[in-house]
Amino acid sequence: MAFVQTNVNYAAEYSRAVANAYPYYSYFAPIWASANSQLYKPGMGKTMYIPSFEVKGASAVDRDNLNGVFARNWNNSLQPVTLDMDREWSTLIDPMDIVETNDVATIANVTRTFNEFQKIPEMDAYAASKIAGFAGAFGGVDATSINSSNILTCWDNYLEYMTSQGVNRDNLRCKMTPAAYKLLKQATGMTRFIEVTNGIRDVDRNIARLDGGEIMEVPADMMKLARVKSGYEQAELQKEKALREIENATLVAPFDGVVANLTAQPYHMASGSVPFCRIIQINNMEVEFQVLENELHLVKMGQKVEIVPQASTIGALQGEICNMNPLVDEKGLIQVRARVKGNAGLMEGMNVSVQIHP
């Protein structure tokens, strides 16, 4: 039999090391791992009461009067903290699945995947929503629309408020979306220093701390939960609604002029059946007059006219015919309009005499 060359069957190897794409790392780990998180944990009951004290300050010593009278100068209070989120997760792995996946489908691997893609993101979202909810009671919600020009001013206002509340700047942690972080890097007035060492021209534009406060980017979808929980989203919608209502309530004339026959009054409901006002374009006024139909051949478009108001204080004005109504009424008259050059104190509805120049 003749030899025929065929494809080689190569061996395949399956790694036991799991490589999930982009595992999630906690953005709120320092808060979850803070000292209070270790001190206060659910124990025997659902509600825990955390004690705190307040005391009176020191007083001046009076060495001439030792009366031996003492009073209690302290008070205690209890803050109730109730467990309001209790979650669990479990799974099942058949022993044969472990064997037949070459020890990949193990409890350790599945649990680690759960922690990285479910547990930690959920804990961070919960932390963001709770902290944002506290903002409404502690400092309020700022609905200012930030940009590169005002973001540092907003930041300074926040620092001023927190410092006034006795919060040390070294304990401040700021979480912001990538879009806000980008604005901070582009902020007007931000001073930057670029250090080049060892001949390596690496430029690091990260902003890890600003004025003592720690800054960290947080995914936008997580911060959206915080916006909803804090009431910021609702405040933003109310602001947009108010702006729309103001825009819809604003009357804008298509030309410049003066207001006449204004019927509405401040703080009164306007009527939908009565005209609100009239706008008179005083710099482009027209005179309306009539000519007999047997004189129509003497009148043409663009013809010069002289307009004399009956008010003795106003002299003669010049104009030209700009419109001729192509209709003869029952009295044999035709409506003609002439545009006045200038104004010279004319008012809407004035009586004038018109002389047509040949």
Image (cartoon, rainbow, N blue to C red):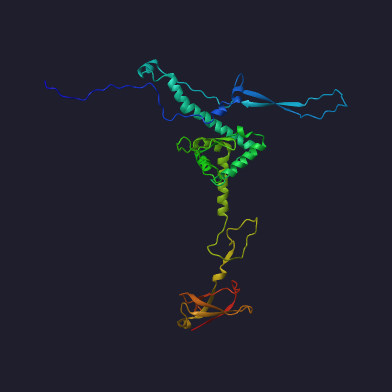
Judging depth in this view, the residue of 336 and 2 nearest the camera is 2
Quadrant of res 41: top right
Q: Is residue 142 visible?
A: no
Rendered view: 217 above or below 186: above
Q: What percent of the width, then of the height, locates residue 170?
A: 61, 33
Q: What percent of the width, then of the height, locates residue 306?
A: 54, 80
Question: Which residue occupies the extreme left position in the image?
Answer: 1
Please give the name of the residue rendered at 56% of the width and 33% of the height, measured from the top-left corner. Answer: 129
Rendered view: 223 above or below 303: above
Judging depth in this view, the residue of 115 and 322 nearest the camera is 115
Question: Which residue occupies the extreme front position in the image?
Answer: 198
Judging depth in this view, the residue of 322 and 187 nearest the camera is 187
Q: What percent of the width, then of the height, locates residue 105?
A: 40, 20
Q: Is residue 159 visible?
A: yes
Rendered view: 337 above or below 123: below
Question: Which residue occupies the extreme right position in the image?
Answer: 64
* Quarter of the rendering occupied by the N terminus: top left
Rendered view: 212 above or below 331: above
Q: What percent of the width, then of the height, locates residue 316?
A: 58, 80
Judging depth in this view, the residue of 203 and 51 nearest the camera is 203
Quadrant of res 353: bottom right
Please give the name of the residue rendered at 77% of the width and 26% of the height, measured from the top-left corner. Answer: 73
Total residue callouts: 0
